[in-house]
Amino acid sequence: MVYELHNESDPEITNIEMDSRKVEKGNLFICISGENFDGHNYVGDVVAKGATAIVAERMVDTTVPVILVSDSRHAMAILSDEFYDQPTHKLQLIGVTGTNGKTTVTHIMDTLFQNQEKRTGVIGTIEMRINNQKYPVANTTPEAPFLQKSFAKMVDEQVDSAFMEVSSHALEMGRVRGCDYDIAVFTNLSQDHLDYHETMEKYLHAKGLLFSQLGNTYDKKKQKLAILNADDSATTELKKMTAAQVMTYGIQNVSDIMAKDIKISGKGTEFKLKTLKGMYDVKMKLVGKFSVYNILASFSAGIAAGLDEHKMVETIEHLDGVPGRFEVIDEGQPFTVIVDYAHTPDSLENVLTTIGEFSEGDVQVIVGCGGNRDRTKRPIMAQIAVANSDYAIFTSDNPRTESPEQILADMESGVEDQSFTSITDRKQAIETAIRKAKANDIILIAGKGHETYQIIGDKTFDFDDREVARQAILQQNHR
Ligand SMILES: CC(=O)N[C@H]1[C@@H](OP(=O)(O)OP(=O)(O)OC[C@H]2O[C@@H](n3ccc(=O)[nH]c3=O)[C@H](O)[C@@H]2O)O[C@H](CO)[C@@H](O)[C@@H]1O[C@H](C)C(=O)N[C@@H](C)C(=O)N[C@H](CCC(=O)O)C(=O)O
Ligand SMILES: Nc1ncnc2c1ncn2[C@@H]1O[C@H](COP(=O)(O)OP(=O)(O)OP(=O)(O)O)[C@@H](O)[C@H]1O
Ligand SMILES: N[C@H](CCC[C@H](N)C(=O)O)C(=O)O
Ligand SMILES: [Mg+2]
């Protein structure tokens, strides 16, 4: 990478930091010019705190060494990878991208690999885990300094395989540049994040970067592999973008790993799993066709990594769900309450269709849409909620700095009939649905899943759909 060095000297660097608020003595500070802040404005502050060198895109007034580059984020990814001695070359790295299912697939893989004596690491929406020890993360796919530091920790802790969610934002911003993926998995593509990517073509292009970054190697022992969903139309494009070998999975289209004869009930799913080696009868607690896709993606990665197929099938039979994904809240009440992280049109439709396949009573859905995110998905999600339920309550998700009422108005604009009500306060919305519920009804509380907070304005409040639902059930004595 081309750079220009000013104030030359050779200071010791203790860490790489991009946020002035976190700088400590001896750090290399990287100035990022973002949408809300410009890191170049904090150089005085960080040098006063002990930063010993600066990476910047324009000259800044300081006496410590300054490395001028044309793209700070690009430089940050390369420097982070080098600083931690290229940790991803020392473990098997599996990246998962797609609109829905990344968290679920990485968690399923983690269990499959651990049950075959592998030491594992996971990085994604819920947390980072290294051999089951949990650490908080700020983003689904963290920025390069945190990411590479985490991989270095995994290497220190003798992790064999790491599974990471790779978001389209991260790919577009180059957060994962330098990551040496062995396997890249694609779940699916449907509408989300058009506030950031603008069009579905650009969104697909961002996802495709994972597969072009996968590259190829002529070293047979290190063969790179793209695992693609044969039933998703984006796969045709992704195949063209990668030089790696391709393995496919699917239910409809002919693929390497297939599921057939799927039977879905409220208690779980049964299907036949066909691999190149054999056919297995699978019975699992996970519900819905989308869960079968998640199993196929995870199973394919297990095969690619040389796991035993019979043992994987056994593990799948005992798999519990992922927190906040189709999580059933059972306080002994005579109706079913499900908390799910569906926050895109496609995931909401999938979950509601799945519920529709086994519901005996009425289906109520409580749903909102996040603020400072894709506005165009709001009317679509509202329409899907109404079309696939007996009654819908629109409420706030994380409104962030947008007006909650405006978000609700955006949702309402997608619906013509009146089988919904809007209740801004999420707790009140959940309590209302639970009060209305009759025996055998199903209530779906969608959008926030595992989240234990709600962001309103610039404040974060404690809020957990699962707890709020539990309390509402107990208070209303529905037992
Ligand atoms: C669109 C997006 O992803 N933006 C991210 C991006 O923002 P940005 O480039 O505009 O940066 P900025 O906030 O203006 O700050 C610029 C620089 O000034 C620095 N700064 C800022 C303030 C200060 O006092 N001192 C200081 O040094 C910041 O650390 C940064 O280096 O870089 C920031 C620093 O890391 C992120 O906080 C911010 O994430 C925002 C908050 C966000 O909400 N991102 C979401 C959409 C996201 O990334 N989501 C994906 C997952 C989505 C999915 O799974 O579907 C994710 O991977 O999590
Ligand atoms: N394969 C799938 N296809 C469609 N919908 C799915 C699939 N898997 C899960 N879902 C739905 O999407 C929701 C989110 O699942 P998950 O958290 O695994 O996705 P994600 O891709 O990690 O999301 P995020 O982009 O927020 O990180 C689930 O609660 C479920 O409703
Ligand atoms: N990774 C997604 C999560 C959305 C979750 C939803 N609860 C919201 O806050 O919009 C995003 O950052 O868009
Ligand atoms: Mg996720």
Image: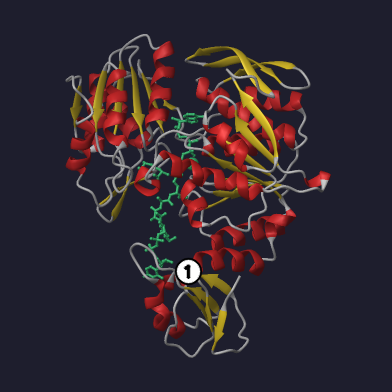
| Residue 319 visible in the picture | no
Q: Give the labeled residue for mark 1.
A: 18
- In-image side of 395 versus 258 (left or right): left
Which structural element holds mark 1?
loop
Quarter of the figure that contains the N terminus? bottom right
User: Which residue, as the protein is rendered here, is positioned at the far right?
Assistant: 220
The answer to whether the beta carbon of the residue marked 1 is less than 8 Å from any atom of ligand 1 is yes
Q: Is residue 144 above or below residue 279?
A: below
Q: Quadrant of residue 96?
A: top right
Q: Amino acid at mark 1?
A: Met
Q: Is residue 87 above or below residue 336?
A: below
Viewer-nearest residue: 400 or 97: 97
- In-image side of 7 versus 305 (left or right): left
- In-image side of 356 versus 83 (left or right): left
Q: How many marks?
A: 1
Residue 125, how many percent across, how many down? 48, 45
Residue 61, how many percent across, how many down? 42, 87
Give me the residue at 61% from left, 47% from top: 212
- Which colour assignment does the render follow? secondary structure
Give me the residue at 34% from left, 29% from top: 445
Quarter of the figure that contains the C terminus? top left
| Residue 52 visible in the picture | yes
Q: Quadrant of residue 62?
A: bottom left
* Mark 1 burial class by Cα count in 10 Å: few <14, some 14-19, many 20+: many
Give me the residue at 30% from left, 30% from top: 380
Q: Is residue 439 above or below residue 233?
A: above
Give me the residue at 73% from left, 32% from top: 303
Residue 40, how many percent across, how many down? 40, 76
